[in-house]
Image (cartoon, grey):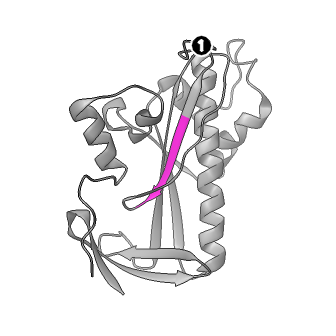
Amino acid sequence: MYKHLPNNTLVQQRDCCGIVYSTSKNEKEKGSLNLEGYCDSDWGNDPDTRKSITGYVVKSGFMGISTTDIVAQSTAEAEFVAACEACMEGQSLRNIVTEVFPELQVNFTLEIDNQAAFMMTTNPTYSRRTRHIELRWHYVRDQVTKKTVYLWKVSPDDNPSDIFTKPLAGARYEKLCALLGQTKEPLPKN
């Protein structure tokens, strides 16, 4: 079955065990699937509880797959935790797809818009400023070191996970919805 998605991307879809797998003509390598993760946080901005909110999205092509929110004690920790949660979700999805479709090369890229989280993820040294962060959140650093996750710095203006952590309106909201694959018009029917 072939379908047209936004931006004239032609995909072939296979349904196996309830999981839909797509390969795009735009993929860099034939037989590969690219998962993209984005993460963001809003530290202590809940007016009632003063709790932090973190959010992430892992997507393939134009489809958003997962989101979540948690609590953190500092901005750096909130961003680092969001990166770790996105990394764990992306790796889980990567493992599922690889198990169902062993012929596929599945790549996972995590994009972070916060410099502190980016540095904590790529730099294995500890400082007194980051000692309060629990060891369980260092999973993302391990995955980057093992080269199972590729890490990129994304501009805050192009980070679709901002939609989960900040009140947005107008053009910015519409831009982030488009980045998540959410459109005003329904997809064309076959």
Indicate left or right for 151 with 173 as reference. right
Q: Secondary structure at mark 1?
A: loop
**Residue 155: x percent and y percent?**
34, 33
Position of residue 144 relative to residue 106, above or below, is above
Q: Residue furthest right?
A: 135
Q: Where, quadrant-wise, is the N terminus in this rendering?
A: bottom left
Total marks shown come to 1
**Residue 16: x percent and y percent?**
57, 83
Quarter-of-image position of residue 85: top right
Magenta run includes residue 6:
no
Q: Residues within 10 Å of mark 1 (few under 14, many from 20)?
A: few
Q: Amino acid at mark 1?
A: Asp
**Residue 178: x percent and y percent?**
29, 48
Residue 169: tell me if it is visible: yes
Magenta residues, start to end:
55-60
Name the residue located 47 percent from the left edge and 35 percent from the top edge: 164
Residue 148: tell me if it is visible: no
Position of residue 187 relative to residue 23, above or below, is above
Q: Where, quadrant-wise, is the C terminus in this rendering?
A: bottom left
Name the residue located 48 percent from the left edge and 29 percent from the top edge: 165
Name the residue located 77 percent from the left edge and 27 percent from the top edge: 134
Secondary structure mostly taken by the magenta-highlighted segment of the chain: strand
**Residue 47: x percent and y percent?**
54, 12
Which residue is under mark 1? 48
